[in-house]
Amino acid sequence: MKIEMFTFCDFAQENGGKLTIVGTYDSVMAKKFPCFHQSLTVVIRVRFDLWEFGQHTFIIETKDMDGNPCFEPLSGTLNVESMGNDTAVTHLVFSLYNLRFKSEGAINFGLYIDEKEVGSIPLYVRHIQQPH
């Protein structure tokens, strides 16, 4: 399997195998802490080879720079089926709302398929300096 895309964005939807993504980013800016981020959508596109077709489990975990969990893990199953090709694509699209960040730093989002880490990306939480 291969991760073809792993990103954060303002909005995404999957419709009949077609993926639409709006406003991709890797940083959240805050004037003060703790802060709340209204919404964040996680988008992952995974390509599976013919011999990988079938059912798989997945978990998306979040950890801060000290390795502590940040949010509840997202988990589920994937049923990868042939569409007549020797590879198949699966899209994972999750919207998270009212995320609370207690301080600036980085949060790692890790994707595990069948209990093996197959990809990760950081979300940077940054402090905006106010002009005086």
Image (tube, rainbow, N blue to C red):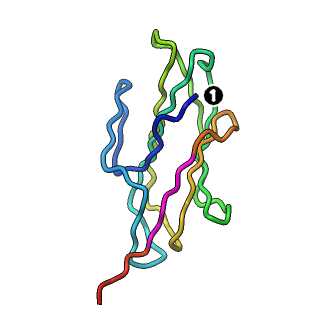
Q: Nearer the viewer, residue 20 or 128?
A: 128
> Looking at the picture, how far across and down is residue 89, in whole percent?
47, 25
Answer with left or right where residue 93 lies relative to residue 113.
left
On the rendered image, what quadrant is the N terminus found in? top right
Outermost top residue: 84
> Looking at the picture, how far across and down is residue 114, in whole percent?
68, 33
Task: List the residue tagged with mark 1.
Answer: 56
Q: Residue at x 33, y 41 (%)?
A: 21
Considering the whole magenta stretch, tell me its main secondary structure.
strand
Mark 1, Cα crowd under 10 Å, few <14 / some 14-19 / many 20+, is some
Q: What residue type is labelled 1?
A: His
Q: Quadrant of residue 129?
A: bottom left
- Residue span colored magenta: 120-126
Q: Is residue 7 above or below residue 38?
A: above
On the rendered image, what quadrant is the C terminus found in? bottom left
Q: Is residue 122 above or below residue 44?
A: below
Q: In this view, does 111 lie above or below 29?
A: above
Tally of numbered tags: 1
